[in-house]
Amino acid sequence: GDGSILTNPLQFTGEDFRLFPGPKPTLTKDDVIYDKVRNTAPIVNEEYKVIFFHVAKAASSEWLRFFTRLEGSPEWCDGNIHEHNHNTLTHYTLADAQRMMTDPTWTRAIFVRNPKERLLSAFLDKVLAHKSIS
C-alpha cells in the first residue's frame, strides 16, 4: 500500500509507518524536544536505538528508573531519579538528533494517560500532598 495506514502492526518498516505523507519534519534549536532548560527532552539509548519521550504523571519516574538501569547505572534505585543526568536528545548536535528522529531503524516511544486521571493525579500529588494540615 501507500503506507498511510498500518495494516499489520507486527511487520512494518519505517517507510510503511507514515501517517502523514510528505517531507520529514526538520528539528530546530527552538523545538521543545531540544530544549536544554526544561526536563522534557527525550531520553536516548544508542545501544538499543530508542528515543523515549517521558510525560509527567504518566509513570515518568518509573520510565526514568528503567532507562537509568538500562544504562547500567547504580543510581536507578536512588531517591530522586529526576536528578540523574540522563542521556537526552539535547546531548547531540541538531544534525545527529535529526538523523535519530527520522531514521527508520530507531524506535521513538511515548506513553500517555487519560487526561482526567492525569489531572486528578497531579492535583492529589502536587496540591493536596503539599498542603499543610492545620
Image (cartoon, helix red, strand yellow):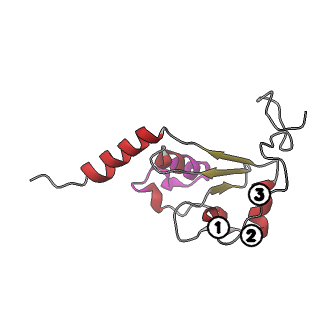
User: Which residue type does callout 3 highlight?
Assistant: Met
- SS at mark 3? helix
For this orientation, the residue located farthest to the right is 1
User: Which residue type does callout 1 highlight?
Assistant: Thr
Of the residues under marks 1 and 3, which one precedes in the sequence? 1
Of the residues under marks 2 and 3, which one precedes in the sequence? 2
- SS at mark 2? helix
Q: Which residue is mark 3?
A: 100
**Residue 30 point in image, percent of width and height:** 65, 71
Q: Which class describes the residues within 10 Å of circle 1: few (<14), some (14-19), or many (20+)?
A: some
Q: On residue 94, which mark appears? A: 2
Q: Which residue is mark 1?
A: 90
User: Which residue type does callout 2 highlight?
Assistant: Leu
Residue at x 25% of width, y 49% of height: 128
Given contact means CB atoms under 8 Å apart, are the residues at marks 1 and 3 in contact? no
Given contact means CB atoms under 8 Å apart, are the residues at marks 1 and 2 in contact? no
